[in-house]
Amino acid sequence: MARNGLRTLAVAAAMMTGSWAGAAQGPSLAALRPLQPGQWELHERGEGSEDGQTRKLCITDLRQLLQVRHGRTLCRSFVVSDAPTMATITYDCAAAGNGRTDLRVETPRLVQINSQGIADGAPFAFTMEARRIGDCQ
């Protein structure tokens, strides 16, 4: 009887490890499907942001929108929720920090991003609007 319990536990652990390893490659999210890579303009909004503070980013992999503060750092991610117009992920970048991002798709060219976590040893939290403005230059 105990042997069956241990076997079940081992199978469950292997399944969880397998799903985490798949997540390390990056989530394939329904919310990202209507979006296109290209030149995106990111505008921070809300408390603590400066009016007019905008930056442009060439997005080659749409998952970059999920970890804006950590850029191209290799991170393990976990999908918390996924729907055609909304997604939530958490991610861990080892010593570089971690975060949680809520992404809401308004149109294929406009998304709202809320993110918080730790980067460079300090906490961060922001609300951002991202708008696709064309192809990368």
Image (cartoon, grey):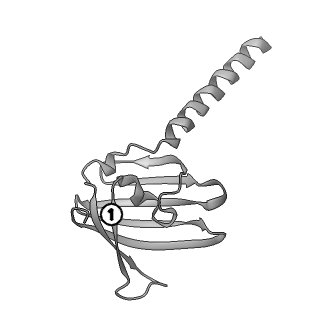
Above or below: residue 64 compared with residue 129:
above
* Residue at 39% over, 79% down: 45
Rendered location of residue 95, percent (x, y) = 67, 58
Left or right of 1, for residue 75: left
Outermost residue to the front: 137
Looking at the picture, which amino acid does disc 1 mark? Cys
Above or below: residue 29 compared with residue 43:
above
Left or right of 30, for residue 3: right
Outermost residue to the left: 134
The image quadrant where one finds the N terminus is: top right
Dot 1 crowding, Cα within 10 Å, few <14, some 14–19, many 20+: some
Rendered location of residue 94, percent (x, y) = 64, 54
- The quadrant in which residue 118 appears is bottom right
* Residue at 49% over, 48% down: 80
Q: Nearer the viewer, residue 102 or 74?
A: 74
According to the picture, the residue beneath numbered tag 1 turns out to be 58
Q: Nearer the viewer, residue 81 or 135?
A: 135
Rendered location of residue 62, percent (x, y) = 35, 54
Helix or strand or loop: what does disc 1 sit on?
strand
Q: Nearer the viewer, residue 69 or 87?
A: 69
Left or right of 68, for residue 52: left
Rendered location of residue 107, percent (x, y) = 22, 61
* Residue at 41% over, 57% down: 64
Left or right of 34, for residue 43: right
In the rendered picture of this protein, how many numbered marks are placed on residues? 1
- The quadrant in which residue 136 appears is bottom left
* Residue at 33% over, 45% down: 30
The image quadrant where one finds the C terminus is: bottom left
